[in-house]
């Protein structure tokens, strides 16, 4: 009797967790599609798209891919999150470079160096993750 109650409670709990999981994924995916759609509409109103605008669309694409992969596999692809970070930092770097070129000074812009360092660190992180996942696969990948 007690074992039966525990099994039923586990079934209900697992169902609720899974339902919340899917609901949250649909909400996040919908927010990404909604944001990307309105960004694209804003781009259509401009005479031309800047590289920052295009990179923003790539960020939305990468976030959508993360949601899709997570939906299908129940695994969060950490590398894709790092790709989003690199794309976001590249977009920020381009904004700083445009600002720097529009008002050139002899002053050193440390923001640009910091952003470049962040991009390099994230790229090294991806290399480490790729090396580790290739040479030390998890037990679930072997099954």
Image (cartoon, grey):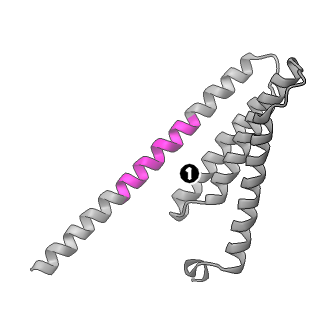
Q: Residue at point 14% right, 73% down?
A: 5
Q: Quadrant of residue 116?
A: top right
Which residue of the protein is positioned furthest toward the front in this rendering? 107
Look at the image and say whether residue 134 sits in the magenta stretch: no
Q: Residue at point 34% right, 59% down?
A: 17
Which residue matches tag 1? Answer: 67
Report crowding for label 1: few under 14, some 14 to 19, many 20 or more residues within 10 A (C-alpha). Answer: many
Q: Nearer the viewer, residue 138 or 40?
A: 138
Quarter that holds the C terminus: bottom right
The kind of secondary structure the magenta stretch mainly shows is helix
Look at the picture and state if 11 lies above or below 86: below
User: How far across and down, in percent of the image, does residue 53 sit?
Assistant: 74, 29
User: How far across and down, in percent of the image, does residue 24 sit?
Assistant: 43, 47
**Mark 1: which secondary structure?**
helix
Q: Is residue 52 left or right of residue 24?
A: right
User: How far across and down, in percent of the image, does residue 134 sit?
Assistant: 72, 76
Quarter that holds the N terminus: bottom left
Q: Residue at point 40% right, 48% down?
A: 23
Look at the picture and state if 54 lies above or below 2: above
Which residue of the protein is positioned furthest toward the left in this rendering? 1
Q: Nearer the viewer, residue 125 or 9?
A: 125
Q: Quadrant of residue 124?
A: bottom right
Instruction: Count the marks.
Output: 1
Q: Is residue 80 left or right of residue 3?
A: right
Q: Is residue 82 left or right of residue 27?
A: right
Q: Residue at point 15% right, 80% down?
A: 3
Please give the range of residues in magenta: 18-33
Q: Nearer the viewer, residue 70 or 105?
A: 105
């Amino acid at each position: 009797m007690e074992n039966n109650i525990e099994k039923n409670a586990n079934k209900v709990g697992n169902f609720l967790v899974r339902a919340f999981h899917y609901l949250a994924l649909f909400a996040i995916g919908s927010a990404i599609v909604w944001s990307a759609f309105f960004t694209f509409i804003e781009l259509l109103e401009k005479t031309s798209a800047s590289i920052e605008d295009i990179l923003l669309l790539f960020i939305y694409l990468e976030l959508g891919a993360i949601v899709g992969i997570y939906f299908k596999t129940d695994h969060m692809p950490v590398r894709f999150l790092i790709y989003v970070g690199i794309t976001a930092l590249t977009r920020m770097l381009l904004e700083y470079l445009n600002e720097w070129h529009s008002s050139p000074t002899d002053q050193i812009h440390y923001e640009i160096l910091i952003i470049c360092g962040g991009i390099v660190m994230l790229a090294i992180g991806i290399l480490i993750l790729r090396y580790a996942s290739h040479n030390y696969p998890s037990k679930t990948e072997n099954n």
